[in-house]
Image: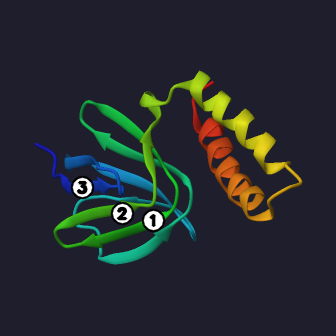
Amino acid sequence: MAETLRFALVSPERELYSGDVEQVDAPGVEGEFGVLPRHAPFMTTLKSGVVRIREAGGVTAVFVRGGFADVTPDGLTILAEEAVRLADVDVSRLEQQIGDLRADASDPGDEARRGRAAERLKYLEALRAALPA
């Protein structure tokens, strides 16, 4: 049996994953990185992107919006600001949200609202780009 890594991925809403895996690849702010069993401890900040959880049964892809990764002798924990399994994304709903945010981001009225909409739009467009074609 192959050696495994204890892994947990948590967002403010819920725990998206907890279990033993073969490898996790994540989008660090200084570049993509992979964590295997017995990896040296470190902590880093994450940028928006796809976390790939590699198990014997395949790969699970989760899109995260920022957060932190903490590798310890006990395993890897990712605390994401926001996270969604790519397989769970409703593409038509995502497109609707993007359209609504484009309208809000171009509204000449409230500058604070425009800024929030532009930030959220950037995240959702990155999520859409991460989806398989």
Q: Residue at x 41, y 68 (%)?
A: 68
Q: Is residue 73 above or below residue 113?
A: below
Q: Nearer the viewer, residue 97 or 68?
A: 97
Structural distance between the alpha carbons of marks 3 and 2: 11 Å
- Mark 3 surroundings within 10 Å by alpha-carbon count, few (fewer than 14), some (14 through 19), many (20 or more): many
**Which residue type does callout 2 highlight?**
Leu
Q: Is residue 21 visible?
A: no
Horizontal and vertical percent position of residue 25: 42, 53
- The residue closer to the viewer here, 130 or 32, is 130
Q: Nearer the viewer, residue 72 or 2?
A: 72
| Rendering coords of residue 1 (x, y %) | 10, 42
- Identify residue for label 1: 67
- First in sequence: mark 1 vs mark 2: 1
Which numbered marker is on residue 7?
Answer: 3
- Separation (CA) of disc 3 from disc 1: 15 Å
Residue 55 in view here? yes
> For mark 1, does the 10 Å Cα neighbourhood hold few (<14), some (14 to 19), or many (20 or more) residues?
many
According to the image, label 2 marks what residue?
79
Pointer 3 with pointer 2, Cβ within 8 A? no
Disc 1 residue type?
Gly
Rendering coords of residue 89 (x, y %): 49, 30
Amino acid type at circle 3 is Phe
For label 2, count other residues whose C-alpha is less than 10 Å away and answer few (under 14), some (14-19) or many (20+).
Answer: many
Q: Nearer the viewer, mark 3 or mark 2?
A: 2
Q: Earlier in the sequence, mark 3 or mark 2?
A: 3
Q: Are marks 1 and 2 in contact (CB under 8 Å)?
A: yes
Q: Which comes sooner in the sequence, label 3 or label 1?
A: 3
